[in-house]
Image (cartoon, rainbow, N blue to C red):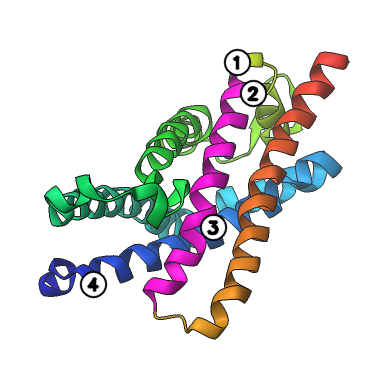
Amino acid sequence: MSGFFKSSIGRKVAMALSAFFLMFFLLQHFAINILSVFSADLFNEVSHFMGTNWLIQFVMQPILIFGVVFHFVMGFVLEIKNKKAQGIAYARNNGAANSSWMSRNMIWSGVAILAFVVLHFIDFWFPEINTKFIQGDWSGTMQGVEGLRYHEELTHKFHSHIRTIAYVIAFVFLMLHLLHGFTSAFQSMGSTVWRKKTLQNIGKAYSILIPLGFIFIALYHHLKYVLS
């Protein structure tokens, strides 16, 4: 296994597999969050199920955390290895002529997304862990809130202008990251040339629509609060 990660191909395959996993999670996360726009009760019910189901909490959640950490660490490792491999020849090449802006700046969009992940954990994951595992409250309720608390917690975060702007900027960076990362992941897994066009079209649709969907959710709840 250590030999697999020492090889360039092995690292790229591992990076691609973690990317597939995170893209699937992102789609699932969006499918739940968009419910908050249409039905607070349905969003609360689904969120409560996800937040109290033992399989999700004790199996899938640790796997997700590992996947996030692994993807970012592997991304930085690949960036360092690529810089070392290219060496002086890299400096003589015209990067703009040989690759897209997005492919040359994946590390920076990744850093921006990592900063957003930290903010997202502070906003939602850490308080959730504190409530359930430290305070021992799995009821899904909150003092002063009628019914389940999840919709109130979500919408409250978007009352702030600064936080809403930060979320929008983060999802723009995510869009840029995905526009290259989606097709790159399939190519690392050995996608054939004839599939490249189809994958590019699917990748563009996914990479644009999902981040735009999250931006819509943030702006919807923010404007609903501001205009109310």
Give the dominant element type of the magenta stretch: helix, strand or loop: helix
Mark 3 — residue? 25
Q: Marks 1 and 4, how far apart in space?
A: 41 Å
Where is residue 102 drawn, in percent x and y? 46, 48
Q: Marks 4 and 3, how far apart in space?
A: 23 Å
Q: Which mark is residue 164?
A: 2
Q: Nearer the viewer, residue 140 or 70?
A: 70
Tell me whether the residue at label 2 lies in contact with that at label 1, contact meaning CB atoms closer than 8 angstroms.
yes
Q: Marks 3 and 2, how far apart in space?
A: 22 Å
Q: How many marks?
A: 4
Q: Earlier in the sequence, mark 4 or mark 2?
A: 4
Mark 4 — residue? 10
Mark 1 — residue? 162
- Disc nearest the viewer among 3 and 2: 2
Location of residue 137 with respect to 26 vertically, above or below: above
Where residue 17 sits, quadrant-wise, is bottom left
In the structure shown, which secondary structural element does the residue marked by tag 1 occupy?
Answer: helix
Q: Marks 2 and 1, how far apart in space?
A: 5 Å
- Disc nearest the viewer among 4 and 2: 4
Look at the image and say whether residue 181 sits in the magenta stretch.
yes
Q: Earlier in the sequence, mark 1 or mark 4?
A: 4
Label 3 neighbourhood size at 10 Å, few (<14), some (14-19), many (20+)?
A: few
The three-letter code of the residue at mark 2 reads Thr
Tell me whether the residue at label 4 lies in contact with that at label 3, contact meaning CB atoms closer than 8 angstroms.
no
Tell me whether the residue at label 4 lies in contact with that at label 2, contact meaning CB atoms closer than 8 angstroms.
no
The three-letter code of the residue at mark 1 reads Ile
User: Where is the N terminus found, in terms of image quarters?
Assistant: bottom left
Q: Marks 4 and 2, how far apart in space?
A: 38 Å
Left or right? Give the position of 138 relative to 205.
left
In the structure shown, which secondary structural element does the residue marked by tag 4 occupy?
Answer: helix
